Image (cartoon, helix red, strand yellow):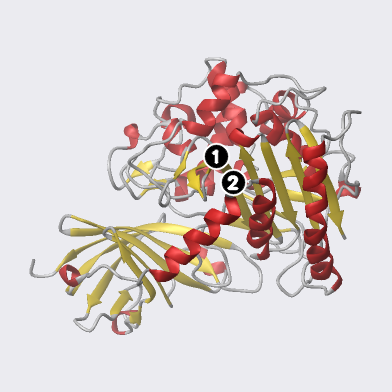
């Protein structure tokens, strides 16, 4: 999650649900913990006290943690069930059944991703895998106590399988993209996605408490998910299972991380070669960054220099879930944190754990904080945008006019002309960010599709200045106590009298 616009996460990433596995701090595999690792364990006591205070105060329902160093699990504990889809795709790549350079539409036929920017045949499987396909923001949740039924992947591709940025040019996290990848795995392998992942990933890696959705016999292990008021959240499903329907325990997930560290641990098959693992971690596009020194590889985020270390990582957040998984190959370290609520304290806990496990991390962290504090915040001038712009919003149901006014004083107003009344109701764009010709902001408004209108929502604007045009996405983000959906459409505008 790289940016926040409200209390809700707009950039939803991989989900790893929590299964509480109450274990103690001890090594596994029947061998003695090294002296160095025993010292790490002592330092975890302060973190245990902090977490205990959070749980006992009722701020956080529960936390599950696992840490591995040098091929052994040195801390695994619960107080109070990552992306795995990419690994499944790479198994089929290694078997020669998927080519990452093939057009993704070759594998989803007869459905097709449509391009508003660039050519749809230029969107490759790799572009979908590393979130540079041009697919915009998307999520859609369906709760068991409500009447709406989940859309099929075919329906979701028809409605929301649109490319709003030229492929290979812009990083944009897309849950729909990984839903498309699970659809491809099913079509190519001839097996259900659940069956493929169970037999090709979970069982060979010895992940006995991991499954797609809640596997048979695992109901009793599943942690209840809680909203921000600590109320239980009913079970929900989504139309992008490859991005958001895996359940795993902290123990299983640390074993998954240790596999990616190339640790040879008992009862774990080598489902991918070491070269393929390296490819997943390091195959980045140097021209498309997420942030300074941070790039999206193949299913993993590669932070080339995070306070002095190359960290391969991924975090995630969904209704009632916050997760993170990190591997540091140079130090043979892995860590996992799972919470059954959405809470940003996950990241402070991650930071504390990295400071313990990585000798120079804390020193570099403090230096970088001081450097950032000394910098003056600056915003790029957007004087070239001043004036009136007119264009169109294209949804899966229809098109309607849109206009924007960039005032000389810096204020920006948007009018979605969905009805005659809306035509005279411009809405101010708030929380505006403009950097590298990218304009972000939110405003009150409605996207009048059947899907979006099921719930009260606000609108997020994410557009780029492309020559004499502004183009990108407008997303209807549900604005209710439950997180329901983030549904995107294409927008393009041109300056009047240009």
For the C terminus, which image quadrant?
A: bottom left
Q: Quadrant of residue 283?
A: top left
Q: What residue lies at 90% left-to-right and 46% top-to-bottom?
A: 23
User: Is residue 328 depicted above or below 424 in this figure?
Assistant: above
From the viewer's side, name the closer residue of 16 and 469. 16
Labelled disc at residue 77: none
Q: Is residue 447 visible?
A: no
For the N terminus, which image quadrant?
A: bottom right
Q: Position of residue 446 (x, y in %)?
A: 44, 72
Q: Quadrant of residue 313?
A: top right
- Which residue is disc 2 drawn over? 314
User: From the viewer's perspective, is 3 left or right of 263?
Assistant: left
Q: Is residue 163 visible?
A: yes
- Which residue is disc 1 drawn over? 300
Outermost residue toward the top in this view: 96
User: How many numbered circles does the render carry?
Assistant: 2
User: Is residue 492 depicted above or below 97 in this figure?
Assistant: below
Q: What residue lies at 61% left-to-right and 41% top-to-bottom?
A: 242
From the viewer's side, name the closer residue of 29 and 394. 29
Q: Position of residue 421 (x, y in %)?
A: 34, 83
Query: How far apart are labels 2 and 1 at the CA level?
Result: 6 Å
User: From the viewer's perspective, is 85 left or right of 155?
Assistant: right
Q: Position of residue 430 (x, y in %)?
A: 39, 77
Q: What residue lies at 63% left-to-right and 22% top-to-bottom?
A: 190
User: From the viewer's perspective, is 6 left or right of 331?
Assistant: left
* Lower position in the chain sequence, tag 2 or tag 1: 1
Q: Position of residue 352 (x, y in %)?
A: 67, 57
Q: Are marks 2 and 1 in contact (CB under 8 Å)?
A: yes
Tag 1's secondary structure? loop
Count neighbours of disc 2 (C-alpha within 10 A) and say few if under 14, some if 14 to 19, many if 20 or more.
many
């Amino acid at each position: 999650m790289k940016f926040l616009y409200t209390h809700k996460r707009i950039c939803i990433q991989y989900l790893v649900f929590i299964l509480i596995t109450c274990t103690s701090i001890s090594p596994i595999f029947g061998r003695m913990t090294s002296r160095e690792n025993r010292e790490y364990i002592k330092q975890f006591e302060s973190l245990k006290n902090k977490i205990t205070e959070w749980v006992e105060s009722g701020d956080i329902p529960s936390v599950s943690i696992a840490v591995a160093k040098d091929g052994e699990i040195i801390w695994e504990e619960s107080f109070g069930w990552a992306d795995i889809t990419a690994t499944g795709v790479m198994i089929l790549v290694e078997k020669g059944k998927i080519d990452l350079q093939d057009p993704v539409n070759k594998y989803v036929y007869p459905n097709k991703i449509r391009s508003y920017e660039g050519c749809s045949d230029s969107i490759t499987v790799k572009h979908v895998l590393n979130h540079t396909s041009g697919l915009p923001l998307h999520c859609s949740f369906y709760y068991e106590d409500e009447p709406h039924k989940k859309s099929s992947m075919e329906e979701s591709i028809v409605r929301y399988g649109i490319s709003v940025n030229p492929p290979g040019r812009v990083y944009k996290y897309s849950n729909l993209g990984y839903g498309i990848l699970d659809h491809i795995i099913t079509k190519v392998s001839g097996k259900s996605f659940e069956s493929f992942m169970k037999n090709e990933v979970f069982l060979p890696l010895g992940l006995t408490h991991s499954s797609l959705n809640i596997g048979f016999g695992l109901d009793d292990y599943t942690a209840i998910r809680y909203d921000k008021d600590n109320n239980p959240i009913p079970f929900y499903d989504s139309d992008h299972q490859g991005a958001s329907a895996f359940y795993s325990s902290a123990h299983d997930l640390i074993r998954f991380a240790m596999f990616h560290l190339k640790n040879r641990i008992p009862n774990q098959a080598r489902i991918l070669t070491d070269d393929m693992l390296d490819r997943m971690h390091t195959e980045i596009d140097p021209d498309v960054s997420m942030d300074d020194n941070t790039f999206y590889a193949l299913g993993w985020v590669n932070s080339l220099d995070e306070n002095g270390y190359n960290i391969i990582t991924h975090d995630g957040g969904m209704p009632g879930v916050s997760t993170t998984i990190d591997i540091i190959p140079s130090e043979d370290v892995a860590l996992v944190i799972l919470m059954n609520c959405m809470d940003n304290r996950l990241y402070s806990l991650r930071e504390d754990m990295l400071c313990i496990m990585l000798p120079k991390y804390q020193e570099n962290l403090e230096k970088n904080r001081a450097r950032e504090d000394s910098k003056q915040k600056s915003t790029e001038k957007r004087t070239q945008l001043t004036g009136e712009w007119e264009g169109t919003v294209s949804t899966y149901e229809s098109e309607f006019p849109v206009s924007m006014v960039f005032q000389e004083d810096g204020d920006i107003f948007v009018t979605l002309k969905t009805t005659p009344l809306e035509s005279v109701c411009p809405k101010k764009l708030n929380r505006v960010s403009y950097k590298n010709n990218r304009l972000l902001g939110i405003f009150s408004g409605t996207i009048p599709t059947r899907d979006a209108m099921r719930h009260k929502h606000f609108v997020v604007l994410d557009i780029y200045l492309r020559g004499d045009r502004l183009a990108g996405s407008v997303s209807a983000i549900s604005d209710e106590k439950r997180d329901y959906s983030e549904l995107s459409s294409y927008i393009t505008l041109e300056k009047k009298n240009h």
